[in-house]
Amino acid sequence: MTAKKTYLITGGAGFIGSHLAACCLERGHGVRVLDDLRTGLESNLEGLDLEFLRGDIREERTVREAVKGVAGVFHLAALPSVPRSIKDPWTSHDVNVNGTLRVLLAAREEGAKVVFAGSSSAYGDTEELPKREEMAARPQSPYAASKVAGENYVRVFARVFGMPNVVVRYFNVFGPRQRADSPYSGVIAKFCRAALEGEVCRIDGDGGQSRDFTYVEDAARGTYLAMERDVPGGEVLNLAGGNRYSLLQLLEALSDLVGKEIPREFGDPRPGDVRHSQAEVSKAEELLGFRTRVDFREGLGRTLDWYRSKRPAHSGS
Ligand code: NAD
Ligand code: UD1
């Protein structure tokens, strides 16, 4: 049994962060959350026995306060959207890069390990699939550039200051509590909502683009393992199932689940969009003993059930 520790989760009131908080609490650890509720919701933390600090990761005093006494920091706070970063590159940079540097400086002072939420967007459009951690970063959007910059700081702090930091790269995480009410929401959240409301799903492009959709409980467990296991400092690990599904396959699976054809329309592809995304998963398996447990269809069913249970709360924008 591992010793009980207290962990800080930045962005812990968000989608992935709230599942990670539950994962840490279930294993007997203490959890503190720092979140400014910009996209997160306090209701995501309902029923979880943790300490909640409302604040911005860009504020030095707030972050120093938040890291006091913690053994590790899961750094998830960020603005996680490609189109948002294209509309407003500065704010994405400020939160995702400057905010990360603030967190690293405070964690270094506290002697805390940092596990950073990286993104598969770092790979850009590689010809070769699956995407291996050793491939050069090829960001295609301001969002991707900001996440790569964050990763680089996390790794440099491992190299220069000897911190045991680890980067986990998520690949299109989906599941309960993902917001469906914003133009920047993830595709599965949006399509689940549309399917339940009988709305048209808008496909940006021809629907042939594919993603390694990963169920959120798996992503949270992998992130937790990256903190708990003895991984060499500065390591980068993909956390995903190693499969890919196109948007057309996603719509087909959703149609099966709701028992009717889901109406769709096609628009222009998004600027900065990546065509295919699929993870090489052997490194996380080797270093963390991590494999996903919930496959795409099972996860999609659970997710749809959750949105159904939340109607009409998630049925208006
Ligand atoms: P989310 O928007 O639900 O969570 C982000 C959280 O950070 C929110 O609760 C938000 O309020 C908080 N936050 C934002 N700016 C802040 C600031 N300045 N100070 C304090 N808190 C702030 O998104 P998510 O999908 O849970 O993403 C979590 C992390 O995972 C992000 O770092 C994101 O880049 C990364 N990621 C997500 C995916 C995905 O598929 N969802 C894929 C790759 C990487
Ligand atoms: C997602 C994550 C991002 C993460 C990245 C890499 C979200 C909101 N963003 O970006 O944090 O870093 O994965 O893992 O989860 N699409 C449509 N119609 C829609 C919405 C989307 O066709 O209504 C298309 C997009 O053009 C894209 C695909 O669906 O081709 C996935 O889009 P999205 O869910 O926004 O995720 P990514 O941009 O891949």
Image (cartoon, grey):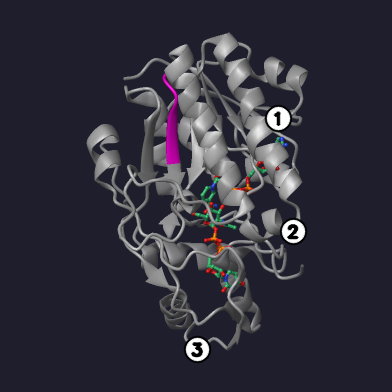
Task: Give the residue drawn at x 63%, y 84%.
Answer: 200
Report how far apart the C-alphas of labels 2 and 1 lie in the structure: 22 Å
Residue 77: x %, y % from top left: 63, 38
Left or right side of 143 for 74: left
Residue 163 seen: no
Residue 108 magenta: no
Q: Amino acid at mark 2?
A: Lys
Q: Amino acid at mark 1?
A: Ile
Observer-side mark, 2 or 1, equals 2
User: Which disc, if any, is residue 87?
Assistant: 2
Helix, strand or loop at label 1? It is: loop
Q: Amino acid at mark 3?
A: Lys
Q: Earlier in the sequence, mark 3 or mark 2?
A: 2
- Magenta part of the chain: 163-168
Residue at the spot of label 3:
260
Task: Give the residue drawn at x 68%, y 53%.
Answer: 85
Give the quarter of the image for residue 36: top right
CB within 8 Å, label 3 to label 2? no
**Is the C-beta of the residue carrying label 2 under 8 Å from the nearest atom of ligand 2?**
no
- Residues packed near mark 3 inside 10 Å, few (<14), some (14 to 19) or many (20 plus): few
**Is the C-beta of the residue carrying label 1 under 8 Å from the nearest atom of ligand 1?**
yes
Residue 230 seen: yes
Residue at the spot of label 1:
57
Give the quarter of the image for residue 244: bottom left
Q: Earlier in the sequence, mark 1 or mark 3?
A: 1
